[in-house]
Image (spheres, rainbow, N blue to C red):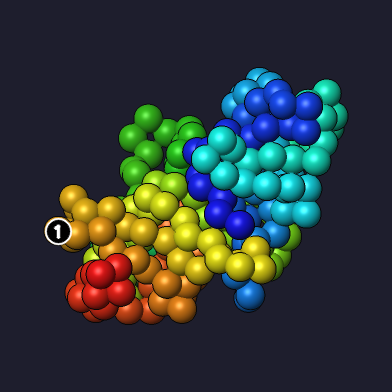
């Protein structure tokens, strides 16, 4: 069953309820578990629907076995970004004593309550930006593959972005396509066997960008 990201999602009564925003897959088996639906009747929220509710998928859209009035009961896809900041205090300064018998310890007080949102006017920003923590209501073994996700090679070089997700028989995701234009002169087919990890922001490969370009272009041909 070919499910294309961006394709219309149609209820069993023929009404469009939204579009496919992403595919939720099992991180161990690459099996399609759910799809994320956005737009349409959902007023800015995104919803999750099990793959078992999909009856057909083609050029006219992805069709569900539920009517439009029941689609609003689908569980929301909850996603929250937050920054986890750990601040380390500066070590105490030791200043030489003037006309006294020992050193004077000057403790540098911590200003503000951390960054961002520190209380001091001159509270310094961290050299490295704090990591972004993402929480969602997907299960521990589920990841979402979406169009536009950044693809990074094993060497740390950006390969490009996901343009098209490829699905095969038995509701399994077989790979995705990185379009030409960033690093590649040709579209590159990336099989799931090359995927080391998928997080909310990007896809990490187990091969370098050069290896992906050479082999992926060959596979596409």
Q: Residues within 10 Å of mark 1 (few under 14, many from 20)?
A: few
Residue at the (46%, 39%) spot, across then down: 116
Q: Position of residue 3 (x, y in %)?
A: 56, 50
Is residue 62 depicted above or below 149 in this figure?
above
Residue at the (78%, 33%) spot, across then down: 12
Residue at the (34%, 53%) spot, across then down: 161
Q: Position of residue 5 (x, y in %)?
A: 51, 45
In the image, is 98 to the left or to the right of 128? left
Farthest-out residue, left: 185
**Which corner quadrant holds the C terminus?**
bottom left
Q: Position of residue 58 (x, y in %)?
A: 57, 44
The mark total stands at: 1
Residue at the (68%, 47%) spot, across then down: 56
Relative depth, front residue between 61 and 165: 61
**Which corner quadrant holds the N terminus?**
bottom right
In the image, is 46 to the left or to the right of 65? left
The part of the image, by quadrant, that contains residue 216 is bottom left
Q: Position of residue 16 (x, y in %)?
A: 66, 26
Q: Is residue 106 visible?
A: no
Residue at mark 1: 185
Is residue 161 depicted above or below 13 in this figure?
below
Relative depth, front residue between 15 and 157: 15
Relative depth, front residue between 186 and 46: 186
Q: Is residue 2 visible?
A: yes
Describe the element under mark 1 as helix, strand or loop: loop
């Amino acid at each position: 069953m070919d499910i294309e990201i961006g394709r219309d999602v149609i209820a069993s009564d023929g009404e469009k309820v939204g579009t496919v925003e992403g595919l939720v897959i099992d991180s161990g088996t690459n099996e399609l578990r759910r799809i994320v639906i956005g737009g349409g009747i959902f007023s800015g929220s995104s919803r999750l629907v099990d793959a078992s509710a999909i009856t057909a998928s083609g050029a006219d859209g992805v069709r569900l076995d539920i009517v439009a009035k029941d689609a609003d009961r689908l569980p929301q896809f909850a996603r929250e970004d937050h920054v986890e900041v750990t601040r380390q205090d500066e070590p105490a300064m030791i200043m030489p004593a003037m006309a006294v018998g020992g050193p004077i310890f000057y403790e540098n007080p911590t200003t503000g309550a951390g960054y961002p949102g520190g209380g001091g006017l001159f509270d310094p920003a961290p050299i490295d930006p704090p990591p972004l923590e993402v929480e969602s209501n997907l299960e521990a073994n589920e990841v979402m593959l979406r169009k536009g996700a950044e693809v990074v090679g094993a060497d740390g070089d950006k390969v490009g972005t996901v343009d098209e997700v490829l699905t095969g028989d038995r509701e399994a995701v077989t790979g995705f396509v990185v379009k030409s234009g960033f690093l590649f002169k040709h579209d590159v087919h990336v099989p799931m066997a090359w995927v080391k990890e998928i997080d909310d922001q990007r896809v990490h490969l187990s091969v370098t960008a050069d290896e992906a370009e050479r082999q992926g272009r060959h596979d596409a041909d």
